[in-house]
Amino acid sequence: MTTVSCASTDLHGNASFGSFAITVRDTKPPVVTPPASITIPATEAGARGLGLAALAAFLAGGTAKDIVDVAPTRLSPQVGGSNVDNNTLFPIAKTTVTFRFRDASNNLASVTADVTVILARPRFPDRSRLRAKIQMARSS
Protein backbone atom coordinates (compact mmCIF):
# COMPACT_ATOMS: atom_id res chain seq x y z
CA MET A 1 0.00 0.00 0.00
CA THR A 2 1.24 3.43 -0.92
CA THR A 3 -0.10 6.71 0.47
CA VAL A 4 -0.36 9.53 -2.05
CA SER A 5 -0.49 13.11 -0.76
CA CYS A 6 -1.86 15.90 -2.92
CA ALA A 7 -2.59 19.60 -2.78
CA SER A 8 -4.74 21.91 -4.85
CA THR A 9 -5.15 25.69 -5.04
CA ASP A 10 -7.95 27.46 -6.90
CA LEU A 11 -7.87 30.90 -8.64
CA HIS A 12 -8.82 32.67 -5.40
CA GLY A 13 -5.91 31.19 -3.42
CA ASN A 14 -8.00 28.64 -1.55
CA ALA A 15 -5.89 25.59 -0.82
CA SER A 16 -6.88 22.07 0.04
CA PHE A 17 -4.77 19.12 1.03
CA GLY A 18 -5.54 15.45 1.13
CA SER A 19 -4.16 11.96 0.83
CA PHE A 20 -5.35 8.57 -0.29
CA ALA A 21 -4.00 5.03 -0.31
CA ILE A 22 -3.26 2.97 -3.38
CA THR A 23 -2.81 -0.78 -3.29
CA VAL A 24 -1.33 -2.42 -6.37
CA ARG A 25 -2.16 -6.09 -6.72
CA ASP A 26 -0.47 -8.49 -9.07
CA THR A 27 -3.29 -10.59 -10.54
CA LYS A 28 -1.51 -11.71 -13.71
CA PRO A 29 -0.03 -15.21 -13.64
CA PRO A 30 3.41 -15.85 -15.10
CA VAL A 31 3.74 -16.66 -18.79
CA VAL A 32 5.01 -20.23 -19.02
CA THR A 33 6.87 -21.74 -21.96
CA PRO A 34 6.91 -25.56 -21.96
CA PRO A 35 9.84 -27.70 -23.05
CA ALA A 36 9.56 -29.30 -26.48
CA SER A 37 7.67 -32.60 -26.47
CA ILE A 38 9.94 -35.64 -26.68
CA THR A 39 9.88 -39.25 -27.84
CA ILE A 40 12.06 -41.73 -25.97
CA PRO A 41 12.62 -45.49 -26.12
CA ALA A 42 11.23 -47.70 -23.39
CA THR A 43 13.85 -48.91 -20.95
CA GLU A 44 11.59 -51.20 -18.88
CA ALA A 45 7.87 -51.92 -19.05
CA GLY A 46 7.67 -48.14 -19.58
CA ALA A 47 10.42 -45.54 -19.48
CA ARG A 48 12.05 -44.60 -16.22
CA GLY A 49 13.94 -41.31 -16.15
CA LEU A 50 16.73 -42.66 -13.97
CA GLY A 51 19.78 -42.49 -16.22
CA LEU A 52 17.80 -41.25 -19.20
CA ALA A 53 19.16 -37.74 -19.74
CA ALA A 54 16.52 -36.69 -22.29
CA LEU A 55 13.66 -37.42 -19.90
CA ALA A 56 15.44 -35.75 -16.98
CA ALA A 57 16.04 -32.62 -19.07
CA PHE A 58 12.41 -32.66 -20.26
CA LEU A 59 11.04 -32.86 -16.71
CA ALA A 60 13.35 -30.03 -15.58
CA GLY A 61 12.34 -27.96 -18.61
CA GLY A 62 10.00 -25.08 -19.07
CA THR A 63 10.52 -21.44 -18.23
CA ALA A 64 8.36 -18.67 -16.83
CA LYS A 65 8.38 -14.88 -16.96
CA ASP A 66 6.28 -12.61 -14.80
CA ILE A 67 5.63 -8.86 -14.95
CA VAL A 68 6.32 -8.42 -11.21
CA ASP A 69 8.20 -11.47 -9.90
CA VAL A 70 11.61 -11.82 -11.56
CA ALA A 71 11.89 -15.51 -10.61
CA PRO A 72 8.59 -17.40 -10.48
CA THR A 73 8.80 -20.67 -8.54
CA ARG A 74 8.93 -23.88 -10.57
CA LEU A 75 6.53 -26.47 -9.14
CA SER A 76 6.85 -30.21 -9.70
CA PRO A 77 5.65 -31.36 -13.11
CA GLN A 78 2.46 -33.39 -12.95
CA VAL A 79 0.61 -36.13 -14.78
CA GLY A 80 -3.07 -36.44 -13.93
CA GLY A 81 -2.64 -34.24 -10.85
CA SER A 82 0.22 -36.30 -9.38
CA ASN A 83 3.81 -35.09 -9.20
CA VAL A 84 6.30 -36.87 -11.46
CA ASP A 85 10.09 -37.00 -11.43
CA ASN A 86 13.00 -38.96 -12.89
CA ASN A 87 11.85 -42.11 -11.08
CA THR A 88 8.33 -42.07 -12.52
CA LEU A 89 7.50 -45.01 -14.76
CA PHE A 90 5.84 -43.68 -17.93
CA PRO A 91 3.69 -46.07 -19.98
CA ILE A 92 4.46 -47.02 -23.55
CA ALA A 93 2.22 -44.34 -24.98
CA LYS A 94 1.91 -40.58 -25.18
CA THR A 95 1.61 -38.93 -21.76
CA THR A 96 0.76 -35.27 -21.24
CA VAL A 97 2.89 -33.60 -18.58
CA THR A 98 1.81 -30.32 -16.94
CA PHE A 99 4.52 -27.77 -16.13
CA ARG A 100 3.52 -25.24 -13.44
CA PHE A 101 4.96 -22.01 -12.07
CA ARG A 102 3.78 -19.73 -9.26
CA ASP A 103 4.72 -16.08 -8.79
CA ALA A 104 5.28 -14.20 -5.51
CA SER A 105 1.62 -13.07 -5.52
CA ASN A 106 0.49 -16.71 -5.59
CA ASN A 107 -0.69 -16.55 -9.22
CA LEU A 108 -0.40 -19.99 -10.83
CA ALA A 109 0.15 -20.74 -14.51
CA SER A 110 0.61 -24.02 -16.33
CA VAL A 111 1.22 -25.45 -19.79
CA THR A 112 1.58 -28.97 -21.12
CA ALA A 113 4.00 -30.94 -23.27
CA ASP A 114 4.04 -34.62 -24.19
CA VAL A 115 6.48 -37.41 -23.51
CA THR A 116 5.95 -40.36 -25.83
CA VAL A 117 7.51 -43.68 -24.88
CA ILE A 118 8.01 -46.11 -27.75
CA LEU A 119 9.24 -49.66 -28.00
CA ALA A 120 12.80 -49.61 -29.23
CA ARG A 121 13.15 -51.39 -32.57
CA PRO A 122 15.17 -54.53 -32.00
CA ARG A 123 18.31 -54.80 -34.08
CA PHE A 124 18.34 -57.86 -36.27
CA PRO A 125 21.58 -58.99 -37.83
CA ASP A 126 22.00 -58.65 -41.56
CA ARG A 127 20.20 -61.78 -42.84
CA SER A 128 22.59 -62.35 -45.73
CA ARG A 129 25.55 -62.48 -43.31
CA LEU A 130 23.59 -64.77 -41.00
CA ARG A 131 22.82 -67.17 -43.88
CA ALA A 132 26.48 -67.21 -44.90
CA LYS A 133 27.54 -68.04 -41.34
CA ILE A 134 24.94 -70.84 -41.13
CA GLN A 135 26.09 -72.31 -44.48
CA MET A 136 29.75 -72.14 -43.41
CA ALA A 137 28.90 -73.90 -40.16
CA ARG A 138 26.99 -76.64 -42.00
CA SER A 139 29.77 -77.26 -44.48
CA SER A 140 32.39 -77.68 -41.75
Image: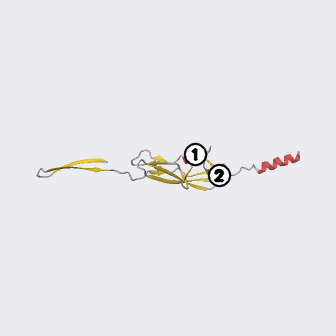
Most extreme residue toward the right is 140
Total numbered labels placed on residues in the image: 2
- Label 1 or label 2, whichever comes before in sequence order: 2
- Residue 123, given in percent of the width and then of the height, sits at 72, 49
Locate residue 79, reporting x and y percent.
56, 54
Which residue appears at 83% of the width and 48% of the height? Answer: 134
50 or 32: nearer the eye?
50
Along the line of sight, the residue nearer the viewer: 88 or 111: 88
Query: Residue at left 57%, top 47%?
Result: 85
Taking the image as shown, residue 127 lies to the left or right of residue 56, namely right
Task: Look at label 1 and name its amino acid.
Answer: Ala
Q: Amino acid at mark 2?
A: Gly
Secondary structure state at the residue bearing disc 1: helix
Residue at the spot 50% in from the left edge and 54% down from the top edge: 111
Toward the left, the furthest residue is 12
Q: Which mark is residue 28?
A: none
Q: Horizontally, is 64 left or right of 10 in the view?
A: right
Label 2, residues with CA under 10 Å away: few <14, some 14-19, many ≥20: some
**SS of the residue under disc 2:** loop
In the picture provided, is 132 more to the left or to the right than 4? right
- Measured as percent of width and height from the top left, residue 138 is found at 87, 48
**Is the residue marked by circle 1 packed among few (<14), some (14-19), or many (20+) residues within 10 Å?**
some
Specify the quadrant that holds the C terminus: top right
Please name the residue shown 30% across and 50% down the image.
22
Label 1 and label 2: CA atoms lie apart by: 15 Å
Q: Where does label 2 land, which residue? A: 46
* Residue at the spot of label 1: 56
Across and down, in percent, residue 11 comes to 12, 52
